[in-house]
Image (spheres, helix red, strand yellow):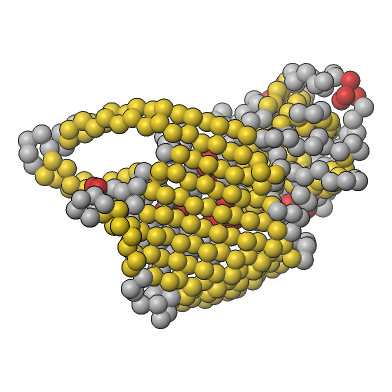
Amino acid sequence: MIRLDGALDDAAWQSAQVAKDFFQNFPFDTSAANLKSEIRLTFDQNFLYIGAVLYQAQADYITTSLKRDFQSGTSDVFAVNIDPFSDKLNGFHFAVSPFNVQREGLIDNGTNLTIDWDNKWYSEIQNHTDHWVIEMAIPFKTLRYRQVSGQNAWRINFVRFGLKQNEASTWSPVPRAFMPVNLAFTGSLIWEDAPPQPGANVSVIPYIIGRTEKDFEFKIPTENKLNIGGDAKIAITPSLNLDLTLNPDFSQVDVDRQITNLSRFELFFPERRQFFLENEDLFGRFGFPDSRPFFSRRVGLANGSIRKVTTEGDTISVTRNLNVPIKAGMRLSGKLDKNWRIGLLNMQTGQVSALKQGPANYTVGVLQRKVFERSAISAVFVNKENFSVDAQEKILHNPSAYNRVAGLEYNLFSKDNKWEGEFYYHRSFSGKQKNDDAQSAAAFLGHSTQKWNVFSGMQYLGRDYRADVGFIPVPGSFRCSTSPE
């Protein structure tokens, strides 16, 4: 039994093996780390415990924010990256600063870190003159893993950032050309005793919320609303999750960063709603960053001009972001086994009278197969089915108002992460519209070393290519680029 108090004086810590002798990642990757670190691991039936003694003078601490999920490069930090399935592509990230400020996130495609994901874990810290001590307790329910017969092995790495020393270091060496979060360079975590068998993992979050809204500037009449709904997360298997939502409310989500847009194209803001975040790469990483066939923020949000009648009887037009009511949704995502991943999403939205927009149904299906060491072949299908509302407020199927996108994609990641590539072909199908050139295709190949980053890519977006549930700023374009750095 570990008492979480930031002191490694429990008996379990005394018998635990010590991971030390960290390697620099920055500024050089050919020398030992200047900041010394000692890491221990142990576990019980509920938690994976990580204890760390990090040598650093207390006077040298640098922390610019005490906000949870602080950005990388803004604070001294100790982090652990865990890859329970050893695929070197998907994992979990937990980090803490010397003042016990926490950050957690998901890692996908080997190196992409998303810190909008939130979950429960615990940490305590004690600060001393020349070092600080961390005790972390990560619930096994927070992790996704599978217990296998025989020896169980995960991938893991420990990371330190010291801002005053201008040093990034890792337990398992990571070349300077890559970020320390990269799962391609994780070390082995061998379980002498197997981790506990994952049990039932079900969480239900009901809610009731009321809101009153009044626009004093335009003197728009007061609007009063009452919502009742809830979310549920069910672990079908330890690595396959079913998310359910009924009449969801996302008022607790952080607001987007303010960005001045001087272009004629809309901006791409990342998804922050928890319902869409776990295994988000399965759904949202198809295509290139500026040509996604599925963008989850198209579901439940809309931008448009609505007409309001003020108390004086004047009619005004107001442009604003509007919530499109989501009636219900389900999302199945995760691993079927070591090589196969699956993603299924279906959501039903209601009508928005202010925009004269009827209900719509959104469906996404994804199947992914791991090939070679770290690469994957994926197939995606996205469908949006619109419905009409007649004068008597009857919901009618509108056969011409649909948009579908189907595609195949190959993502290349070499074992040493020096080679990276992406190749895809997508085609859209829209009712009663031209589909002659409704296709999108692209190829990208890059090679990274300590001295050179060389990449070349080309992308074609057909003039009739349409993805209503995606992010396609400029259809009808061809781009080609090659760059050595």
Report the front residue among 280 and 11: 280
Residue 412 x/y as whole percent: 68, 67
Q: Residue at x 91, y 38 (%)?
A: 192
Residue at 49% in and 49% down: 270
Does 2 sit above or below residue 307? above
Residue 123 in the image: x percent, y percent?
69, 26
Count every numbered label the image shows and give the total.
0
As drawn, 381 above or below 464: above
Q: Is residue 247 left or right of residue 59?
A: left
**The C terminus appears in which quarter of the rendering?**
bottom right
Residue at 36%, 70% in the rendered image = 431
Image position, residue 162 (x, y; %): 70, 37
Would you say 31 lies left or right of 95 here?
right
Give the x, y percent position of residue 6. Answer: 75, 21
Q: Nearer the viewer, residue 301 or 57?
A: 301
Toward which corner of the image does residue 161 lie, by quadrant? top right
- Residue 176 visible in rendering: no
Q: Say if residue 207 shows up in the picture.
A: yes
Q: Is residue 60 above or below residue 383?
A: above
Q: Quadrant of residue 453?
A: bottom right
191 vs 181, left or right, is: right
Front one among 451 and 375: 375
Quadrant for the N terminus in the image: top right
Query: Of 145 and 161, which appears nearest the observer?
Result: 145
Q: Please report the residue visible at 48 percent of the width from the left and 57 percent of the height from the top.
A: 363
